[in-house]
Image: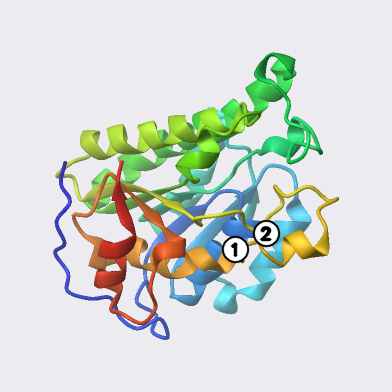
Amino acid sequence: MQAKRESASMPGSNQEHLRGKVAIVTGGGRGLGRAMALALAAAGANVIVTAAREAAEIEAVATQASAGRIIPLLATVAQPDECDRVVALAAERFGRLDILVNSAGRGMKYVSENFLTEPTRFWETDPAVWQMVIDTNVNGPFYMARSAVPVMLKGGWGRIINVSMNHQTMRRAGFSPYGPSKAALESETVIWAQDLNATGITVNAILPGGATLTGMIPDGVTDAVKAKLLPPEIVVQPLLWMSSEASNGVTGKRFDASLWRSDVCPDDAAAQSGQAL
């Protein structure tokens, strides 16, 4: 597995170092996806942001980006033809696709709103909910990557970034099917990285590094608990490095945003926060 660094540093965060790049961020209407879509647009990329149902949310994100750099599009990652449509829009509008961020996800609140205090045992889980979570969290990234890779191969460069989670949460009692879905996504990440070795396309995972204030947190959580949650923006700096030329050759790894240090150069921060899969 290739994992060397070929670029010394990334331009400062105030520069549009991703100008000319084209990105897709699934699940970009809220939480981590929203933070990443806005960051990529601010760095100069043109971004297509998708959501399965919440048109108002992705339209609101688009209005926050300058120069019309975010295009909102309703599409569900659980359907291969919908994923083809998203990638086709990027190719038709911009003639290229450089970055795919698989952020769309379904969490434990679909199993139970009380999942944090009253765990649901796996055999008590509604099969329809299990299927929905797997379709979004496991099949969705595959469908999106399957559509995106041929376009990236034509360009000879690309980034596939999958949103993961702590290993402890993957193994937490009562966290089926969310935990198993993210374990499967990490397996996809390392296998795809090997399949795409030496193509110019890298595949890595990113995780906040702890419980994060996103739509996956149930509505009944107290303000005291919310105050302890990580902000979605914690993933922005590692994401921008992973999306840039600075990360050339770095593939098949997971980057823990909670370990990212802003007081060192981005390459050093990446070396400290990156973990083998």
Q: Is residue 78 visible?
A: no
Q: Quadrant of the N terminus?
A: top left
Q: Is residue 136 above or below residue 160?
A: above
Q: Is residue 243 above or below residue 66?
A: above
Q: Which label is found at residue 4? A: none
- In screen coordinates, is 92 left or right of 194? right
| Coloring applied to the structure | rainbow
Q: Residue 211 appears in which quarter of the rendering? A: bottom right
Q: Earlier in the sequence, mark 1 or mark 2?
A: 2
Residue that appears at 51% across and 62% down: 47
- On the image, the x and y values in percent for residue 197 come to 18, 41
Where is mark 1, residue-wise? 232
- On the image, the x and y values in percent for residue 46 come to 47, 66
Where is mark 2, residue-wise? 213
Return the residue nearer the eye: 24 or 30.
Answer: 30
Return the residue nearer the eye: 272 or 241.
Answer: 272
Which residue occupies the extreme right position in the image?
220
Amino acid at circle 1: Pro
| Circle 2 crowding by C-alpha within 10 Å: few under 14, some 14–19, many from 20 | some
Residue that appears at 44% across and 35% down: 185
Residue that appears at 61% across and 61% down: 34
Q: Is residue 12 visible?
A: yes
Amino acid at circle 2: Leu
Mark-to-mark CA distance, 1 and 2: 6 Å
- In screen coordinates, is 122 left or right of 240? right
Q: Is residue 203 above or below residue 209?
A: above
Q: Quadrant of the C terminus?
A: top left
Residue that appears at 44% across and 68% down: 45
Labels 1 & 2 near each other (Cβ < 8 A):
yes
- On the image, the x and y values in percent for residue 24 come to 49, 53
